[in-house]
Image: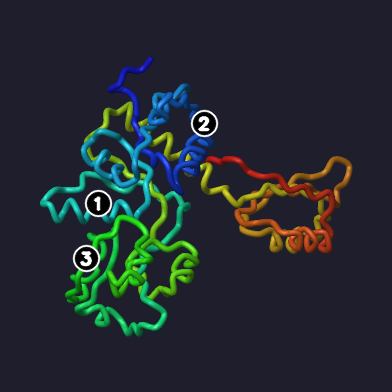
Amino acid sequence: MANKEQRIRVAVQKNGRLTDHSIDLLERCGLKFTRSKDRLFCFGENMPIDLLLVRDDDIPGLVSDDVCDLGIVGQNVVEEKRLQREAEGRDALFDKVYDLNFGHCRLSLAAPEERPFEGPESLEGVRIATSYVGVLRDYLDRNNITADIEYFSGAVEIAPRLGKADYICDLVSTGGTLKANGLREVATLLESEAIIIQTRAPLAADKQALVDKILQRLDGVLQVRESKYIMLHAPRSALNEIRDLLPGTEAPTVVPLDGADDRVAVHAVCRENVFWETLENLKAAGASSLLVLPVEKMLA
């Protein structure tokens, strides 16, 4: 068994919108875990990679301080913690190494429906409630705006109703919560998604090789998330039209059919959704025996 120094430790959100997706993604990369009784640690069974399940806002610090080698966390949290550390005169000793393309949201300013907003200058002298003090302060400074920042750790959207703030700055996914509280988005400060960060502390060659392998596997899983594998038979004379109808594909594989010189089998990985209309158009072009399969993983 690999000793502690040889094992990769990955910080993952314990509870929240990124948790299940992060663990599922790692399992799709071939990793198997046993979760501890306190559900705070996942031991890697088949590879020397363990998960530390923590609060999401602790992840950048754990990676920066080299407690963990990698972290899966939202870009919004990373940016907030980076700015906090800089304000304290400390370096954020981590780097983004991979965009995971899930957990999409945005950090936005929102105002009561009846309040006019004509740009950053509308924020001069107002009160803004947020838990993202660093990102908001950076936005205000870059726009030469002086405003009072009121820290709220939760339920930020009710601050205007309580008379505690004129605006809020909070994460938005669909905007439904804002609308339910009589608020509207007026500016986007940051677009966010789940990312992987890595410590700047040098890793031993074998550990870095393992990190590179996991990133390669992630690439193989994520690049085929919406992909489908299509197999069909077609007349040779219809090949050009059928190639044009296959969505998001490179050159398909074309194989002669035994005993039928005028017909071929076509296999293709389509990197876009394959809708019923696509199949119907392919059939109208002369394709037959169409089969669509999901793609679980792929290495280029």
Where in the figure is residue 121, as x and y percent of width and height?
Answer: 24, 82
Q: Amino acid at mark 2?
A: Gly
> Residue, x 32% and y 32% (percent of image)?
208
Which numbered disc flags the more N-terminal residue, 2 or 3?
A: 2
Report which residue position mark 1 lands on: 81
Report which residue position mark 2 lands on: 30
**Quarter location, residue 122:** bottom left
Q: In terms of secondary structure, where does tag 2 sit?
A: loop
Q: In terms of secondary structure, where does tag 3 sit?
A: helix
> Residue, x 49% and y 41% (percent of image)?
20
Asked whether, in this view, residue 49 is left or right of residue 131, the answer is right
Mark 3: few, some, or many residues within 10 Å (few <14, many ≥20)? some
Report which residue position mark 3 lands on: 138
Q: Residue furthest right?
A: 259
Is residue 144 depicted above or below 290 in this figure? below
> Residue, x 36% and y 71% (percent of image)?
161
Q: Give how far apart the Cα atoms at labels 2 and 3 are.
A: 40 Å
Where in the figure is residue 50, as x and y percent of width and height?
Answer: 39, 28
Asked whether, in this view, residue 231 is left or right of residue 117, the answer is right
Which numbered disc flags the more N-terminal residue, 1 or 3?
A: 1
Q: Residue furthest top?
A: 1
Q: Amino acid at mark 3?
A: Asp
Q: Which quadrant: the N terminus?
A: top left
Label placed on residue 249: none
Q: Amino acid at mark 1?
A: Lys
